[in-house]
Image: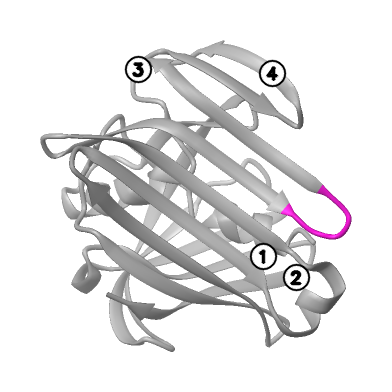
Amino acid sequence: MKLLWIVSAALALAAPPLAAAPDAFQASYTVSAKGLEMGVMNASLRYDGETYTYQKITKANGLAAVLSGDTLTERSTGKKHAAQLLPEHYVYHHKNKRKDKKDEFRFTTATQVDGSFDSNTYQLNVPTGTLDMAALELTLMDALATNQALNYRVLSKGKLQDYRLRKLGKETIEVPAGNYECEKLEVMHDNNERQTTLWLAPKLDYAIVQVRHQEDGDVIETRLKQYQ
């Protein structure tokens, strides 16, 4: 089931070269499609001395769990240097009853990566400041707080990719966690077949409150349920 992959991709869409370190937090989200709740995502950022771990676990529930058994785990670990987060190791593992896909890599230096995607190993030279997909969310929080540009380089599935976002203004929305005034962003996809919109709340240090992704006529929403 591609639902959990879309959720993960939509929630990780931006990063300047280095991220200012946000405070530790825990959050949970509902994932819905066609008006029905299909899954739950739990996210957490924690620190252990000079090391950070940001992890997201998304699981299908209800009928979706019975049919697919879908589970997606995404984790970024690295160092906290002063006010900056420096990612070192990334894991993306999507597993269900039909497939088992994994993307994993390490930054051996600031500009070199060793990784494996679908059991195929690779080595890449990347620009300084390239980040993994999970760490992007933490960086986006800082980018909005400090009014930085929203054009970024990320590594995913063995390929270096560009991400661009644009601001659509402010909007107050209601989610299970409450009402929040948000900064509304749109992801600039390279075609018109996909549309991704994000809402991030200044009150929560620009944590993501809602994501809406539309593709192939389907609309998937991820909405904040709890944040602490």
Name the spot of residue 153 as percent of width and height, x first: 45, 29
Task: State which quadrant residue 150 falls in.
Answer: top left
Q: Secondary structure at mark 2?
A: strand
Q: CA distance from mark 4 to mark 2?
A: 34 Å
Kind of residue at disc 1: Gln
Mark 3 vs mark 4, foreground winner is 4
Q: Are marks 2 and 1 in contact (CB under 8 Å)?
A: yes
Between discs 4 and 2, the one toward the N terminus = 4
Tell me if 167 is positioned left or right of 49 in this view. right
Left/right of residue 100 with respect to residue 8 in the rendered view: right
Quick one: label 1 or label 3, which is nearer the N terminus?
3
> Around disc 3, counting alpha carbons within 10 Å, would you say few (fewer than 14), some (14 to 19), or many (20 or more)?
few
Q: Name the foreground residue: 198 vs 125.
A: 125
**Disc 1 to disc 4, how far (Cα)?**
32 Å
- Whether residues under marks 4 and 2 lie with C-beta atoms below 8 angstroms apart, the answer is no
Residue behind mark 3: 128
Instruction: Point out the stretch of residues depicted in magenta.
Output: 95-99
Label 1 belongs to which residue? 214
| Residue 169 seen in the figure | no
Circle 2 residue: 218
Q: Position of residue 180 (x, y in %)?
A: 29, 81
Where residue 108 appears, as percent x and y from the top left, is 43, 15
Tell us which disc is closer to us: 4 or 2: 4
Disc 4 packing (10 Å; few <14; some 14–19; many ≥20): few
Q: Per the image, is 123 magenta?
A: no
